[in-house]
Amino acid sequence: MMDKNRMLRNQQMKFMIYNFIAFTLIFTIFGIIILSQVQNTLYTKADEEMQNYKNRNVNLTPRDSFPPEPRDRDRKMSFNPRMIILHWNETGEIMNQAQIGTQFYENLIDGLQMDEQDLDVIKHLNFNNLYNFRTISYLNDYEDDIYITQLLVNVDAEETVIDNFETILIFCTVIFILLSITASYVLSRKTMKPIMISWSKQVEFVENASHELRTPLTIIQNKLELLLTKPNEKIVDRFENIALSLSETRRLNKLTTDLLTLARADSTETQFVKKSIDIDVLIEQACVPYVEIAESQDKSLWMQLDSKMQLEADASRIHQLLVIILDNALKYTSKNDSIGIKTSYEDHRIVIEISDTGIGIREENVRHIFDRFYREDQARTREKGGFGLGLSIAQWIVSGHQGTIKALQNENKGTTFVIKLPK
């Protein structure tokens, strides 16, 4: 038990770690994408203005005033007052130093070197870790003295927005990551819940199957060992032992068949072969032997088949479904009791009702009757040869036909099984 609990805890911890890693990666990638998009958006305006200026070939000579006088309304509207224009000669000297201002030159761009490598490429410059600029350099082919023109646009406001956004984004990411720990824990528990249920059902199934197999095997072994102690006796003298062994062998064969059916149902290995059938005709054929059995037990079996419909279904499985329920009805009814089968068509569904006036099912046990190996009265069921698997198989057959099955208590006594199958 401790090993099981430890294994389940370890598996839950793995799920939690996987979920946490997934959440962290998602939040991190999301934050990086958002930050890059914000940066690109904030820098777009400044970059576009520099590109427009460059493409329009607005050239300033050292004699021009700063900022330049626009030539027309369109250029006036397109010129950014934050833009600074530097003219470099071939020796790497700034030719319009006087126009850009001595203080600006000495405090910021003194020491700035002409860039001949990354021409026509927008770059980011930082001066003294205080001021940020977007810049582009290009060859100036229109003035003999000017070799390269460099445009700079101050983006300190954009940088402030980006820095604040980064702080908020980092704070929110940390909060989300902390929340993801809680979410990972909750999700891991929810993920483990069906696994634990399945595990418990599997363990219960194996234990019950082992118990049910052990009983007939023990009986058969004991009877055979008893026969070996007296090898010279005639068969007629040991008829009861042989008959009991054969009876238990048949029970064992039925149990293994039912277990195999349920195992295939769990693995979805068994496929339903559906074809159009007349449900009333199929029910009537399935009930023929049970009418005789009921009469031999002083019981009555009546039919009221009024659906008159064709059904897309697996005929052999529907027949198996009817056999399971009719077998139960015969087992748990006494003399002078009756068993009835009715069919009808309601709300685009074929309804099959199988009722009896037998001992019925206690109300608190109705919800368990489709569980595997469940038996309301263990001793009485074993006496009648049941294993508690029939109704589980019945439910699987109905579910495989996208239908529903439920058990209802009759007003007087007995039980009614209501099966609804889509047409």
Image (cartoon, rainbow, N blue to C red):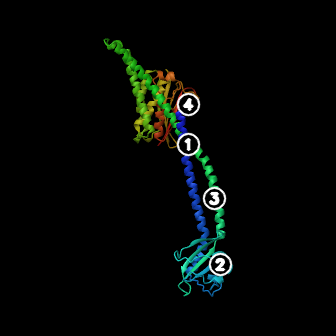
Which residue is label 3 attached to?
Answer: 169
Q: CA distance from mark 1 to mark 3?
A: 29 Å
Could one spot residue 280 in this view of the protein? no
- For badge 3, the amino acid type reads Leu
Which residue is label 2 attached to?
Answer: 105
Instruction: Give the numbered dot on residue 13.
Output: 1
Relative height, residue 271 to residue 203 (above, below): below
Q: Secondary structure at mark 2?
A: helix
Relative height, residue 258 to residue 174 (above, below): above
Depth order, front residue of 179/303: 179
- For badge 4, the amino acid type reads Val
Instruction: Mark 3 or mark 4: name the one nearer the start of the chain.
Output: 3
Rendered image quadrant of residue 287: top left
Residue 14 x, y percent position in the rendering: 53, 44
Q: CA distance from mark 4 to mark 2?
A: 92 Å
Residue neighbourhood size for the residue with mark 4, other residues' Cα within 10 Å, grouped as few (<14), some (14–19), many (≥20):
some
Which residue is label 4 attached to?
Answer: 366
Image marks 2 and 1: residues in contact by CB distance under 8 Å: no
Relative height, residue 412 to residue 147 (above, below): above
Tally of marks: 4
